[in-house]
Image: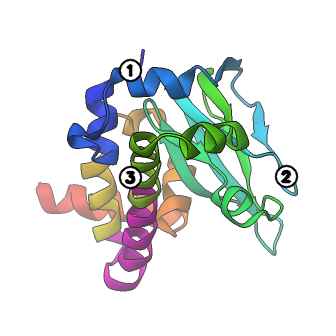
Amino acid sequence: MIDLQKINELYHFDQHIDFEDIQIILQLAQREHFEKGTYLLEIDSMQKKAFFIEKGLLRAFTIDHKGDEVTTLLRWENQFMVDTKTILFDMPSSIYIEALENTITYSMDIREVQQLVSNDLKLQHVRNLVLRAELIKAYQRIDSFILNSAEERYLAFIDRNREVLHRIPDKYIANVLGITAVSLSRIRKRMANRSE
């Protein structure tokens, strides 16, 4: 179920959006069910879709120069998952999007959303708030890699994502933090030893 309060918290809409606005946008969407392990997007795709997650958990990942999967982003209920590079810059996707659980999304063709938004100032503002929130998250992530230790990044990740932490495999958490699963285990062990 769509939680408008949670959406407002994540994207800082405040008084700018109400449920009717969400309904207008979701009328363009197709409600889709994805089984665990299904790819919603693949590398080199030009698919211009946004996925609003009603229920479930998605990850974005790429393949590094050694052929290993590297998870770059995790999203769950009441959040958007999209390949920004394809949508904003009309470039082929450099990520895969995979369902880590059975997932229900509202999938939207971005071209249709843009057409709807172009005729509505309030919806333009909402779109800008979503893009702004995503850009802030990207900059915060870059800053955390420069300014924070791996342990500080892990503590911040726990603090921001406590409600879904148990649903995310450790190897994906480690990837998002820019560390190995072994390093994550060491960090947890150090933290446990300090709390004793």
Image coordinates for residue 129, horizontal then vertical, percent = 38, 52
Q: Position of residue 29 (x, y in %)?
A: 64, 24
Q: Residues within 10 Å of mark 1 (few under 14, many from 20)?
A: few
The residue carrying mark 1 is 20
Q: Amino acid at mark 2?
A: Met
Can I make out residue 146 in this image? yes
Label 3: state its secondary structure: helix
Using the image, tell me which numbered label, if any, was put on residue 179.
none
Q: Residue at x 80, y 65 (%)?
A: 91
For the stretch drawn in magenta, what is the main secondary structure?
helix
x and y percent of residue 63 in the render? 78, 63
**Amino acid of disc 1:** Glu
Where in the figure is residue 50, as x and y percent of width and height?
64, 40
Does any portion of residue 161 appear in the rendered image?
A: no
Magenta run includes residue 135: yes
Q: Is residue 165 above or below residue 93?
A: above
Q: Which residue is mark 2?
A: 46
Position of residue 174 in the picture relative to residue 154 (left or right): right
Dot 2 or dot 1, earlier in sequence:
1
Mark in the foreground, 1 or 3: 1
Most extreme residue toward the right is 44
* Above or below 149: residue 108: above
10, 167: nearer the viewer: 10
Decide: few, some or many residues near mark 2? Use Cα within 10 Å; few <14, some 14-19, many ≥20.
Answer: some
- The reply, left or right, for residue 24 in relation to residue 39 is left
The span picked out in magenta is 133-151
Q: Nearer the viewer, residue 185 or 27?
A: 27
Picture mark count: 3
Answer whether residue 123 is magenta in the image.
no
Q: Which residue is mark 3?
A: 129
Task: Give the vertical position of 101 relative to 64 (above or below).
Answer: above
